[in-house]
Image (cartoon, rainbow, N blue to C red):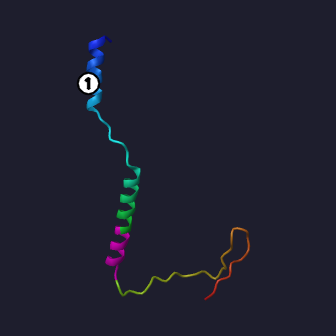
Amino acid sequence: MDQRDLELLDKQMRAINRAPRRDGVIIVTVLVVFLAGMSLGHLLAAPGTEPTRVAMNDLAPVSPEGLPLVVHQ
């Protein structure tokens, strides 16, 4: 590369001015969109319906240590 090539390369590289990343703005935007979606989903869900009931087996749930968990009904 001669001096002219270096000058042209420098001129081209100045045109590619990368903006600094703004991670904080991206994180806040994702959080706001997530919360807005959760709120909108809650509002659009069928209001006035009974909560979903989950059937339980007769077996008592067991903790990872092997001890039975207490289930109040």
Does 38 lie within the magenta span? yes
Q: Is residue 34 above or below residue 18?
A: below
Task: Pinpoint residue 60: horizontal percent, then vertical percent.
Answer: 67, 79
Q: Main secondary structure of the magenta part?
A: helix
Relative side of 11 to 23, left or right: left
Task: Pinpoint residue 40: horizontal percent, then vertical percent.
Answer: 33, 73
Q: State the residue in front, 15 or 37.
A: 15
Task: Pinpoint residue 48: horizontal percent, then vertical percent.
Answer: 36, 87
State the residue at coordinates (51%, 81%).
Answer: 54
Q: Quadrant of residue 37?
A: bottom left
The residue range painted magenta reads: 36-46
Q: Quadrant of residue 26?
A: bottom left
Find disc 1 in the rendering and name its residue. 11
Relative side of 7 to 25, left or right: left
Q: State the residue in front, 46 or 57.
A: 46
Relative side of 41 to 15, left or right: right
Q: Where, quadrant-wise, is the N terminus in this rendering?
A: top left
